[in-house]
Image (cartoon, rainbow, N blue to C red):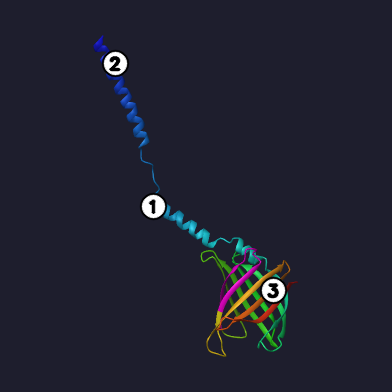
Amino acid sequence: MKARWIVCSISLFVAVAFAAGSILAQETKPVKKKPLNEFAKEAMEKAWAEAMLPGEHHERLERMAGSWTYTGKVWMDPGAPPTETSGTSEQKMILGGRFLQLDVKGTHVGQVFEGIGFAGYNNLAKEYQSVWMDNMGTMIVTMTGECDASGKILTSHGEYKNPMTGGMTKFRSVSTMKSEDKFVDEWFEIKQDGKEVKTMELIYTRK
């Protein structure tokens, strides 16, 4: 009887050990991992998606798309009265809603004025970027900026080579969306002592 009990005990022990071994083998079974090239591909696709897809900042630019007329003032000399200016601006989103294109025609200090500009938001640099060209010079002016919390005021900074001094002149521009049908552009020249002088103010009204 005792021998039979021993045999049963050994059989039970073996069964329990085998079951435990099977469970342990299942728990420690290695999980199939994705090849490194798949992880790299997913990371690359995510990075490119974040870089290329338009977002809320591009929607803000789209609010400025349309046909506009403008009137304004230009201060050639801070101590002298400003010169009146006026014209039209056609603005539209291009390249899948990623950039705003501006085409401006009007008068500037008594001369025919034409200008072309492009504005966008760089998702990677997290800043607004723009370029401007017109028939009053041969330079391409570049600017970078940011919106305030309301999304209605865009402040940009840039610089250009001043033909009068031969040096670089820094400036600040402020575009304020007053309503869906009106916005104001203001330009300020920054002197070497840090003081600002207002050089231009344009008031745009949607046609």
Nearer to me, 203 or 94: 203
> Which quadrant is home to the C terminus?
bottom right
Circle 1: element type: helix
Circle 2: element type: helix
Q: Residues within 10 Å of mark 2 (few under 14, many from 20)?
A: few
Image quarter of residue 186: bottom right
Q: Which residue is mark 1?
A: 36
In the rendered view, would you say 60 is above or below 156? above
First in sequence: mark 3 or mark 1? Answer: 1
Q: Amino acid at mark 3?
A: Val
Residue 76: x and y in percent read: 66, 87
Q: Judge depth for marks 3 and 2 and give the one in front.
A: 3
Q: What's the CA distance linking mark 3 and mark 2? A: 95 Å
Q: Which residue is mark 2?
A: 8
In the rendered view, would you say 186 is above or below 25? below
First in sequence: mark 2 or mark 1? Answer: 2
Q: Residues within 10 Å of mark 3 (few under 14, many from 20)?
A: some
